Image (cartoon, helix red, strand yellow):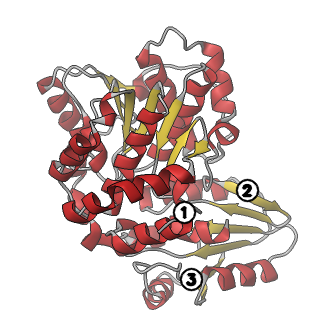
Amino acid sequence: MNTYEEIRTWLYEQLPMYQRQGASAYKPGLEKMEAFMGYLGDPHKEFSSIHVAGTNGKGSTAHMITSVLMEAGYKVGLYTSPHLKDFSERIRINGIAIETAFVVSFVQEHKAYFLEAQLSFFELTVGMSFAYFKEQQIDFAVVEVGLGGRLDATNVISPILAVITNIGFDHTQFLGNTLEAIAGEKAGIIKKNIPVVIGETQEETTTVFKTIADELKAPIVWADTVEVKPYQTDLNGLYQKKNKHTAIVALQTLHLDQLHEEHIRIGLQQVVSNTHLQGRWQMLDKNPLVVADVTHNAAGFAFVIEQIKQTTFHKLHLVLGFVKDKNLELIFSLLPQNATYYFCVPNIGRAEEISVLMNLAEKYTLNANAYESVEIAYKSAAKNAEHNDFIYVGGSTFVVAEIL
């Protein structure tokens, strides 16, 4: 294995990967990760980090914080997941993806350890990001939680700030079936004496966060109770309003000498060009209007449907595919009936079967057809759409990845 392509293929095939396999690849617990960090020389202790969790918006919020810190002149590492097009997107410094030569040398050097320790794909990737950030001598790492918080591989860090965007129903088979239980898992990133910013005050979760923060003497800031200036952002999507608010409060909570109001203003306006974030209400074409969006749960779809209602078009076409383990009943109950649906199966092992989608479409009386691939579904929508129609592509990160 000498090339990046060979290494990347090995990573995907040899190691359990949650995005592709689902529950069988999910290995909660920090023991292996802590041992891995020790083996690597504890690279995560060589830089300051900001830890971002939440059901929705944690990726966008992490990118916003990164963009602003870049504008303030800091060297900023960003770790996110999953990737859309290439593995290297997960690990960036000042918006630039990890050098493929580092990926190759890192895997070659430590392959025996990975196999012996039986690391998951995610654990290996987190360790690789921290090793890379240490080597590149970054100022800050903005680290997005993979799943949950308490038992997530990223939770080996001791951040200078924890951020929890919101709590909704997703990954309930791992995190619990109540908002309180899910909040308890996300609150696992709160550390002793370290401030935590909570993006949304929610009746069911407030006590959970307050109790844990009090126990750890962690100063808690409820972002939606803090007034901030109405800065603009280049990230479209109604749901970005809350993410932007959370990011601004998080940045202000850091109290960095080098960070000024102008950095926040410019950083929020240049998130895409600074960090190369994709798939968030991303406009791909104008006539017809084509938007790709990675929203994949009911809480997110509520915002998507509201934004569709606020968009001007003649006819609506939705190209949708999903992965298993989502509450599709709830999502389908939100979908508009005056639209044409193109249901498809993304090219991934844990994609939801087309028969399940079509049965739900029938139950909710949606005008729908089934397609064996994302590409065929999209081409059919493009063929049927007229100049002033609207094509929305989403339901899963993997559907969007295939379109991009």
In the rendered structure, which amino acid carries the disc numbered 1?
Tyr
Q: In the picture provided, is 243 more to the left or to the right than 274?
A: left
Q: Is residue 290 above or below residue 204?
A: below
Say which residue label 2 marks. 283
At x 17%, y 20%, the residue is 217
Q: Quadrant of the C terminus?
A: bottom right
Where is residue 69, by image quadrant? top right
Tag 1 residue: 4
Give residue 221's position: percent from left, percent from top: 34, 23
Tell me which label, 3 or 1, sits earlier in the chain.
Answer: 1
Circle 3: residue type: Cys
Comparing 284 with 18, the one in front is 18
How many residues crowd mark 1 within 10 Å: few (<14), some (14–19), many (20+)? some
Cα distance between the residues tagged 3 and 2: 20 Å
Would you say residue 228 is visible in this rendering? yes
Percent coordinates x, y for residue 182 in the rendering: 24, 51
Residue 1 position (above or below residue 72)? below
Q: Is 174 situated left or right of 352 in this image?
A: left
Q: Secondary structure at mark 2?
A: strand
- Ranked by sequence position, the earlier of labels 3 and 2 is 2
Residue hosting label 3: 344
Q: Mark 2 is on which residue type?
A: Met
Q: Residue at x 47, y 63 (%)?
A: 296
The mark closer to the camera, 3 or 1, is 1
For image coordinates 35% across by 57% down, the residue present is 122
Report the Cα–Cα distance between label 1 and label 2: 31 Å
Among the two numbered marks 1 and 2 on one chain, the one whose residue lies closer to the N terminus: 1
